[in-house]
Image: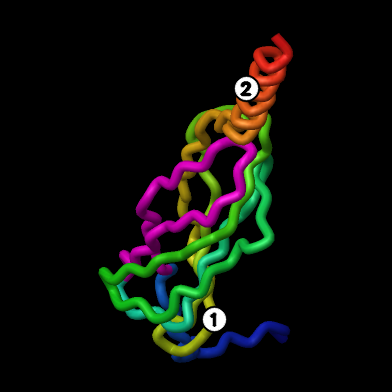
Amino acid sequence: MDEYVELDPVRIGVKVNPKMEFEVVGQPSIAAGEEKVVTFVIKNVGEFEVRDATARITIVDPFSSTDDSAFIGDLKPGEAANATFKISVDGDATPKLYALNLEVKYKDAEGEWAYSEPAKAIINVTPAKPPYMLYAVIAIIVIAAIAVYLKRR
């Protein structure tokens, strides 16, 4: 006797939505050694509306952040929203373009939580800004020294 029994195949109704695609627009600049709030525009380039979307940026060296998530809300196909993050860059960071991964957590058409494929968020790191306050203090000291010298003379 055959111990395996063949059954008629049964189909069950499980709908699988395609992964949503999001486009990251914008290329903020930040100077090495600076902390700044940067903004990216997140555009829904998928085929359906997403609800309660939150963008999350993956922070890697030479960056750091205490704020790596941004609520962007509901987005219909073709719509865009701003996502802002507070980011710091090491003072010795090499000035160049950096690409950080950004993913979006959202509720799909059936109300289920899903994650997008990572998109690239480009940040331009510029050379460190000169310490203008230091220059001002040095200038005041030099002027004071000249004044003292002229007064004694």
Relative placement, left or right, of 30 versus 148 is left
Q: Quadrant of the N terminus?
A: bottom right
Looking at the image, residue 16 lies above or below residue 130: below
Q: Around disc 1, counting alpha carbons within 10 Å, would you say few (fewer than 14), some (14 to 19), or many (20 or more)?
A: some
**Within the magenta stretch, is there residue 41?**
yes
- Colour mapping: rainbow
Instruction: Say which element carries label 2.
Output: helix
* Rendering coords of residue 79 (x, y %): 29, 71
Q: Looking at the image, tell me whether mark 1 or mark 2 is earlier in sequence order.
A: 1
Amino acid at dot 2: Ile
* Rendering coords of residue 120 (x, y %): 47, 49
Relative placement, left or right, of 90 versus 41 is right
**Within the magenta stretch, is there residue 74?**
no
Residue under the image location 47 percent in, 76 percent down: 53
Residue identifier under label 2: 143
Residue under the image location 40 percent in, 71 percent down: 18
Amino acid at dot 1: Trp
Q: Which residues are magenta?
A: 20-46
* Rendering coords of residue 94 (x, y %): 59, 28
The kind of secondary structure the magenta stretch mainly shows is: strand
Instruction: Say which element carries label 1.
Output: strand
Front in this rendered view, residue 130 or 98: 130
Please state which of the two labelled residues, at mark 1 or mark 2, is closer to the viewer: 2
Residue identifier under label 1: 113
Q: Quadrant of the C terminus?
A: top right
| Residue at the left extreme of this rendering | 78
